[in-house]
Amino acid sequence: MPVPLLDVNAQNLPLECEFKEAFERVLKSGQFILGPEIEHFEKQLATLLNVRHAISVSSGTDAILLALMALDIKAGDEVICPSFTFFATAGCIARTGATPVFVDSDPNSFNLNPQALIAKITQRTKVILPVHLFGQSVDLEPILRIAREHNLLVIEDAAQALGATYRDRSVGTFGAFGTFSFFPSKNLGGFGDSGLVSTNDNDLAEKAKLLRTHGSKPKYFHKVVGANFRMDPLQAALLAVKLPHYQSYSKKRRANADYYTNRLSALEGVQSGEMETVRRDPDQASEAKIILPSTSPDLGHIWNQYTLRVLGDGRRDQLKTHLTNLGIGTEIYYPVPLHQQECFAYLKSNHLDFPVANQLAREVLSIPIYPELSDEQKDEVIAGIGSFLN
Ligand SMILES: Cc1ncc(COP(=O)(O)O)c(C=O)c1O
């Protein structure tokens, strides 16, 4: 039985009738820019996140760009973000004219390492932009404290983490802005591109809304330069159909993660993420071949990805090939850390500053975790990993 990395139809087709109704409603409304569908969706998202303002936008990328623009980030400013993340995090910083300043990751959570942060702060630093990677909250407390101490703002890139929590509060609600994506592979996967910014600050919400429509207020009068960052009402109407199922999707992802963790950790050579220190012990080093993702009660995980670390030179790529041959989909998020990307060569980053990001790029492999996976499919993935280790 093939096990794809993602099966959007398995989630969407059972709701086909409701999607058709939503489409007809929008079609007959004749309202294709902003309006009630958008307002309804934004209200629902604000409730889900327990945040004052949820502002829908055209993509998760545009959400980051809009948040940076609303904070007046521009040429000459520096914005700190992790090196081990999706390109958009830093791409948006560069697009404002500001300089992305990369920080190494924590080897257990894969998220920005707060201890490596302070050394990167300069007079020009304006924003810290942590990412809740793979759906797991970044350890926010030290980051927010450092931001307060240095008078910096925080934007949380929660593109992969809608509904993840930090100490029981939704991520994306701690910083000046949170940014989200509804790209089809995300936990609330849409029908094309769309995203959202969240904020508890009334003035920032106003500014974000202004920038979302060319900075125009009233119409055709522009005090600031914005752009077209709007979500389509059709997208909002379709996403609203999926929203009531969101908690159930998340529950299934958590159950899938537990299923993997319980069974994979029983295999010889597989260790849980928290065992990193054990792996570093030379006596035990030979035993660990695969490390499972780590979790912690504080860092609520929404399991957008279940990401293994495969130890040993070239072993990750060998496991990927092995699973591909068995019909099992996997992906490497991400093979090249951002400090090594050609487009950021001008930053002249010292590659030795990023031992963890460099190592993760060689070791990570994400396996299927989508909610509709059957036990038989998960068993195939586990058996495939088992046969690789034997
Ligand atoms: C961490 C992160 N940031 C930003 C984005 C950008 O979101 P979008 O693809 O909706 O533009 C993504 C999406 O892949 C992401 O994973």
Image (cartoon, rainbow, N blue to C red):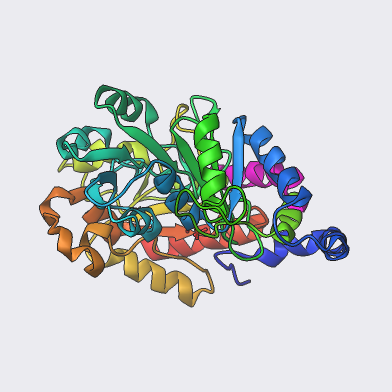
> In the image, 275: left or right of 132?
left
> In the image, 243: left or right of 57?
right
The answer to whether 282 is drawn above or below residue 331 in the figure is above
Magenta stretch, overall SS: helix
Q: Position of residue 381 (x, y in %)?
A: 52, 61
The answer to whether 95 is drawn above or below residue 318 in the figure is above
Q: Residue furthest bottom?
A: 325
Q: Taking the image as drawn, is residue 32 in sight?
A: yes
Q: Quadrant of residue 71?
A: top left
Q: Quadrant of residue 213?
A: bottom right
Q: Position of residue 144 (x, y in %)?
A: 35, 27
Nearest to the observer: residue 189 or residue 80: 80
Q: Quadrant of the N terminus?
A: bottom right
Nearest to the observer: residue 193 or residue 295: 193
> In the image, 346: left or right of 225?
left
Q: Position of residue 76 (x, y in %)?
A: 21, 49
Q: Quadrant of the C terminus?
A: bottom left
Q: Taking the image as drawn, is residue 170 in sight?
A: no
Q: Which residues are magenta?
A: 241-258
> In the image, 289: left or right of 383?
left
Which residue is drawn at the image coordinates 28% and 64% (left, top)? 336
Residue 253 among magenta residues = yes
Nearest to the observer: residue 268 or residue 361: 361
Which residue is drawn at the image coordinates 17% and 65% (left, top)? 345
The answer to whether 353 is drawn above or below residue 138 in the figure is below
